[in-house]
Image (cartoon, grey):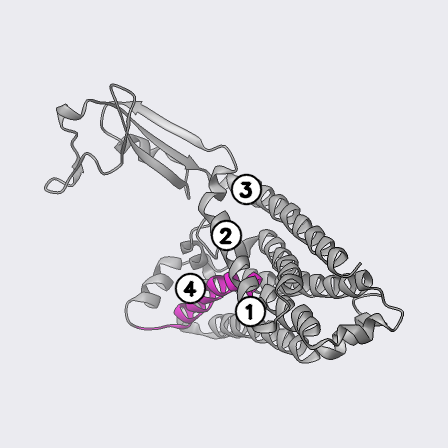
Amino acid sequence: MSVLSPSGSGWVAVRQHRRALWAAGWLVAVAAAIPLTLRIWLAASPGEAACLAGDWHMCDARAFNGQMSITGLLWLAMEYADQSLLFLPALLGAFVAGPLVARELESGTYRLAWTQSVSPRRWLATRTAAAAAVAVVLSALLIGTFQLGGASVGFRSLAHWPERGTYESSGPVLVAYCLLGVAVGVLVGLLVRRTVPAMAVAGGASALVVLLFGSFRWDLWPHKVLSGAGTGREGGWASLPPDTFVLRSGYVTEDGARLPYDSCWDLQTGHDACPPELGVTSWFIEYHPPSAFWPVQLTETALILALAAAVAAAAFRVLRRHHA
């Protein structure tokens, strides 16, 4: 069986869920049409030709000064796109858990397939493989669409590379999360065996994993530290590489304790002014340079794929235990 020409139980699964596949295809088509149309419109507009020539400051001003320009529309489209892609793993997990697995078990229609020379293991493997293939293709196409919308458009750089949504939709980690959503959906569908509850549990679990990994992903790769004696950090901030992602900053006291960055902030002067009683001896800035993007992406992708494989293996163990 291949993805493009399924046969046997794979063809049955495709026929059963062809409406969902058509919906996914239309989703990609619409997602690609919006930024492409706006970029063509932008290039053909004499008043905004400077945007494509590199005058991004003018474009940004026009986009946010109350005069919504084509540039502003493209910016909004990309901003909503990268945030929306965060929900893709949860949607895939919910669909796999509910209509693809749990509904078959709840209604008992799986028995018909198992009496047609299709073993339970092959039945589940076929559905898992088909869902995984759709997840890879769908997520890859949407990532490509996101990159197409922002390619060669300088104002996209306003979306900082480590931000939620921008980070996930700029590399292979989103594909890994979608595969994890498929694996979670299969396992939850086998355990819950009821369509609506399975969709809720699988969607929530997939979204929770995305949220949890996002909270500590920047600790997966060693960060850099910039520090100096005294209480003034102005020179430290000025020496940071461009487009740096600052993790933490603050002060170190005489006894080695760390104070947050706002411990010495003076609202009246607008500068750092540490009181002597704090005993501040130095300052620190922990950060990731832009070059840390791909090491973090690849490390997180590997971890998520390993987790997806473990969850998928657990799903087949559950199947073997209940339907040996």
Q: Which is in the foreground here, disc 4 or disc 2?
A: 2
Query: Which mark is on residue 99?
Result: none
Lateral position of residue 63 relative to residue 210, left or right: left
Numbered label attached to residue 167: 2
How far apart, in angstroms, are the residues tagged by discs 3 and 4? 35 Å
Depth order, front residue of 104/299: 104
At mark 2, the secondary structure is loop
> Callout 4: helix, strand or loop?
helix
Is label 1 in a helix, a strand or a loop? helix
Q: Residue at x 42, y 55 (%)?
A: 159
For marks 4 and 1, the one nearer the N-term is 4
**Is residue 150 among the parts visible in the rendering?**
no
Q: Which residue is mark 3?
A: 296
Disc number at residue 197?
1
Q: Which residues are magenta?
A: 67-90
Q: Specify whether residue 78 is painted magenta.
A: yes
**Residue mark closest to the camera, 1 vs 2:** 1
Q: Element under label 3?
A: helix
